[in-house]
Image: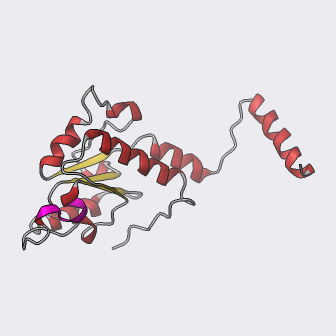
């Protein structure tokens, strides 16, 4: 082992004994962000029922610290687009997304939000929410189970904790 590395390890052990935590500001902020998502629910169809049931005691989304579903986009940092996004609702979805403060993330829940689902050829349905807002995590299914939403939120957590491993895109118009 390199002498310099060994000295760093000894210094880190000594700091740990004194209850001192050394980390960058960005790592500390990311740690806080991933343990307290405040989702803004944008439930449009049957997927919204599954999203709501993920907060029930059986699935208990609150054990991860994600139970505070915000009604106001100005207090949310995660938008969950659950269901069929129609062309009539697309400007509203974009407005809600624009009103959210940075950093913000979006989850597309269900086949309709991911790719238009069985209604993709319809004149009234947007073929995927990614044409309106940038999507960070896709959760397929019709409708996806609450376990899928929890798994998707944990995948988003990994994406935020490890930005070097998962490229984070800038949410720019």
Q: Foreground: 83 or 40?
A: 83
Q: Residue visible at 17% across and 54% down?
A: 83
How many numbered marks, from 0 up?
0
97 in relation to 147, above or below: below
- The furthest residue to the right: 3
- The location of residue 47, given as percent across then percent down, is 18, 48
- The location of residue 115, given as percent across then percent down, is 23, 65
Q: Is residue 154 left or right of residue 91?
A: right
- The location of residue 44, given as percent across then percent down, is 13, 53
Magenta-span inclusion, residue 38: no
Q: Foreground: 102 or 146?
A: 146
Q: Is residue 24 left or right of residue 108?
A: right
Q: Main secondary structure of the magenta part?
A: helix
Q: How is the image coloured?
A: secondary structure
The magenta-colored residue range is 113-118
18 in relation to 164, above or below: above
Q: Foreground: 24 or 143?
A: 143
- The location of residue 72, given as percent across then percent down, is 23, 48
Q: Foreground: 12 or 125?
A: 125
Q: Is residue 163 left or right of residue 130?
A: right
Q: Quadrant of residue 67?
A: top left
Q: Residue visible at 33% across and 74% down?
A: 173
């Amino acid at each position: 082992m390199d002498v310099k590395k060994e000295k760093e390890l000894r210094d880190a052990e000594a700091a740990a004994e004194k209850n001192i935590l050394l980390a960058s500001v960005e790592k500390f902020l990311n740690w806080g962000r991933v343990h307290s998502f405040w989702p803004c629910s944008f439930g449009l169809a049957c997927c919204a029922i599954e999203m709501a049931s993920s907060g029930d005691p059986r699935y208990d989304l609150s054990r991860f610290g994600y139970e505070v579903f915000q009604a106001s986009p100005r207090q949310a940092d995660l938008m969950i687009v659950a269901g069929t996004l129609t062309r009539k609702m697309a400007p509203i979805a974009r407005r809600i997304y624009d009103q959210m403060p940075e950093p913000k993330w979006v989850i597309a829940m269900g086949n309709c939000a991911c790719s238009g689902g069985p209604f993709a050829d319809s004149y009234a349905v947007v073929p995927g929410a990614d044409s309106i807002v940038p999507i960070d995590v896709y959760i397929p299914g019709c409708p996806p189970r609450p376990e899928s939403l929890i798994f998707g939120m944990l995948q988003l957590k990994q994406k935020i904790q490890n930005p070097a491993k998962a490229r984070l895109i800038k949410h720019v118009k």
